[in-house]
Image (tube, rainbow, N blue to C red):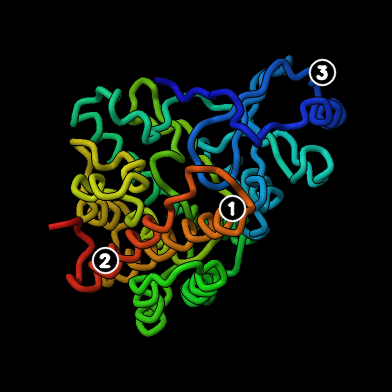
Amino acid sequence: MLDQPSPIREGEALDQEALQTYLRQHWDGFRKIEGIQQFPGGYSNLTYLLKTNAGEAVLRRPPFGANIRSAHDMGREYRVLSKLRPVLKTIPQPIVYCEDEAIIGAPFYLMERVEGIILRGNLAKQLQWAPKQMRQVSESAVDTLAALHQIDIEATGLIELGKPEGYVGRQVEGWIKRYYKAETDKVPAMDELAQWMQKNKPAEGPAGLIHNDFKYDNLVLGPDPPHNIRAILDWEMATVGDPLMDLGTTLAYWTEPKEARLMPLAAANLTWLPGNLNRQEVLHRYAQQREITITNPVFYYVFGAFKIGVIVQQIYARYQRGHTQDPRFANLLQAVQYFGQRGAAALGKGKISGLD
């Protein structure tokens, strides 16, 4: 059940000869690419497995047709990995970065491959883990997020990743701006969330390291025991700021059973399988691990739901504008509506629990 690559999807092939020539000049010990495959899933950056004489490596590049440079900054992601590697054992070793778009059509970087289990949505039917195992995985994920947020960003130099002052306000205004720039259809719930967040921004909390996309399919597990987290992936949006904003994104991704039956995209995060903590338990355990009180969890959850809706809307807009023909994107407007409605429901109930 280890994460396995598949044949490269149509229209997403790499120029193997040009890539091989470049790597010979920039990767010590490299001579030849023996094969290239693509990892499944993902709606953002593309991920490939390179089998080479120097071992296996993972290549990351922006999606074809993407024009959201700040959201697909390969150089920044490579620098983040380089800074984090000495601090965290669960960071894959970066190998090489290339900013020359002439090689494969976009900037890219290589990192070591960490083998293990990645809980992607397509595993839901074949995963035979007992509820006890799933509970251990969910507890380990929450504990890992809390630990990330307690790293001393001053002592480690990670403060250089961003400007924590004013982070909450910049995030709210920035994601609202991105949404309306990518808007294709009116989604009243997203409008409601945007207006509410602007009027209800909380005070800044102490700054910490923020992953910004912390969910199951960005964790490499086990395989023995499965709740052992071997690597944390996808650091493209990492920065420093109020960690509760990061928690909000994780809570919004954290799908509960009734919700999984409503929205396939939400069901891809396997937190709805029997044994997992629910959102309220995630919030409680996280607060315990950090020894803090979270006075306004609804705001952070609403922000997370809105942010995910914006990310999906940006992908859908690329499809609508003809920048990609990937059939997976055709019905993403429904997902934008779903995340907007989940946020609006939390406002109505004043709590982050799932469907009643």
The residue carrying mark 2 is: 293
Q: Which of 245 and 150 is in front in this view?
A: 245
Q: How crowded is the residue under tag 2: few (<14 C-alpha within 10 Å), some, or many (20+)?
A: few
Q: Quadrant of residue 268?
A: top left
Q: What type is the residue that disc 2 sits on?
A: Thr
Residue 170 spot, x, y in % from top left: 53, 74
- Of pointers 3 and 1, the one earlier in the residue sequence: 3
The residue carrying mark 3 is: 31
Q: Please identify the residue farthest to the bottom as the structure is shown.
A: 199
Q: Is mark 3 on a helix, strand or loop?
A: loop
Q: How crowded is the residue under tag 1: few (<14 C-alpha within 10 Å), some, or many (20+)?
A: few
Q: Is mark 2 on a helix, strand or loop?
A: loop
Q: Which of 12 and 299 is in front in this view?
A: 12
For residue 20, side relative to residue 77 (left or right): right
The residues bearing labels 3 and 1 have C-alpha atoms spaced at a distance of 35 Å
Q: Nearer the viewer, residue 195 or 225?
A: 195
Residue 127 makes an appearance in the image: yes
Image depth: mark 2 or mark 3 in front: 3
Q: What element carries label 1?
A: loop
Q: What type is the residue that disc 3 sits on?
A: Arg
Q: What type is the residue that disc 1 sits on?
A: Thr
Residue 65 spot, x, y in % from top left: 67, 50
The residue carrying mark 1 is: 156
Residue 300 spot, x, y in % from top left: 35, 66
Q: Nearer the viewer, residue 211 or 330?
A: 330
Residue 202 makes an appearance in the image: no
The residues bearing labels 2 and 3 have C-alpha atoms spaced at a distance of 54 Å
- Of pointers 1 and 2, the one earlier in the residue sequence: 1
Q: Residue at x 25, y 25 (%)?
A: 129
Q: Which mark identifies residue 33?
A: none
Figure check: 115 above or below 256: above
Q: Work out which quarter of the rendered image holds the N terminus and state it.
A: top left
